Amino acid sequence: MASLENFRLVVFRAVAEQLSFRKAAEELYLTQPAVSLQIKALEEDLGVQLFNRTGAHITLTATGKVLLNYCEQVKTLFGHAEQEIAALSGEHAGQLALGASTTIAQYVLPGLLGEFCREHPRVHPTLISGNTEHIVEAVEKQKIALGFIEGPARSREVKTEPFLEDELLPIVSTAHEWAERNSVSCSEIASIPLLMRERGSGTRHVIEMALKREGVNRSSLHIVMELDSTEAIKSAVEAGLGIGFVSRWAIAKDLRLNNSFKIVEIEGVRIKRQFLFAYGSVPEPQGLTIEFRRFLTARAGLQRTSVMTNRFQPAGTHKNRK
């Protein structure tokens, strides 16, 4: 279904969000002069100036801010209209704006999203990724209809509910002194160089809280490097820079391919967490968002079974993990 939104408003919204004619042109696959022409025509139609232009920099005028607010409402309303019209014919269609924290976006959602789109070919999803803090902010600002996060939302404006279980596993390089050990104590974790996700990461928050419950405070951790992705942590571990914690979903394929790191058991500690749906309390999710959430809830159990049947081997042993 073609977009119901007026094209000039689409162009205006892109420029207003990017605050750049060049970036808006790239986003819309237009030339920069074409974008400028559309904005000029819209300003002439309305009889107002929508942007302050100072050299290469632009900002929204007061009237531009008012128009942007209504454009965002129009986009949402037309999106709901497209979904409801499609639903009357027994189909699901329209734009589905999603956001996911890094681990979920990279290792969990692609397969599920691909399956959903094969079942509903007229659905056009968009997916942004970032840490939990960024995704919660996107939900708050209604930039996305549904978010997927790895830690608590810590926002009264955002509701969450679990949809999939995860476990964070400590990994070391095969050349590390712990690589041949069956387990280490929690106190030893505090004395070893650690590779951690950046502040604001749901993964980091869950790890710090789990260690704190075992008497290991954040201030006592020997964090030698902060990295902004699981892949970066895996690479740093393989390079022997320290030990890191990663999601079991992130290393399932690596372990099947016998990659160059090993899992280390922490005595008496299993760092489990739930991946969460995150959505705004106002407006309530509807239409396509609800259908996708229902689809994921049904499929998540199958995904969990698939990963769990691939038992991970701790360092120093070739026996199945119990």
Image (cartoon, rainbow, N blue to C red):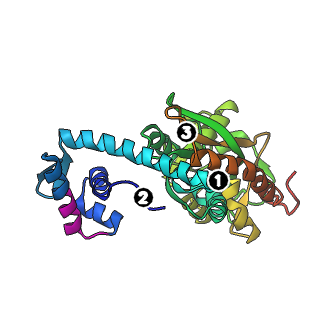
Residue type at mark 3 is: Tyr
Q: Quick check: 44 left or right of 315? A: left
Q: Which residue is mark 3?
A: 279
Magenta segment includes 210 = no
Q: Earlier in the sequence, mark 3 or mark 2?
A: 2
> Which range of residues does the magenta coloring cover?
30-39
Q: Which residue is mark 1?
A: 246
> What is the CA distance from the residue labelled 3 to the residue labelled 2?
24 Å
Camera-side mark, 1 or 3: 3
- Residue 129 rendering spot, x and y as whole percentages: 50, 53
Q: Quadrant of residue 15?
A: bottom left
Q: Earlier in the sequence, mark 1 or mark 3?
A: 1
Q: Which mark is residue 3?
A: 2
Q: Quick check: 151 left or right of 155? A: right
Name the residue located 67 percent from the left edge and 36 percent from the top edge: 210
Q: Quick check: 74 left or right of 110? A: left
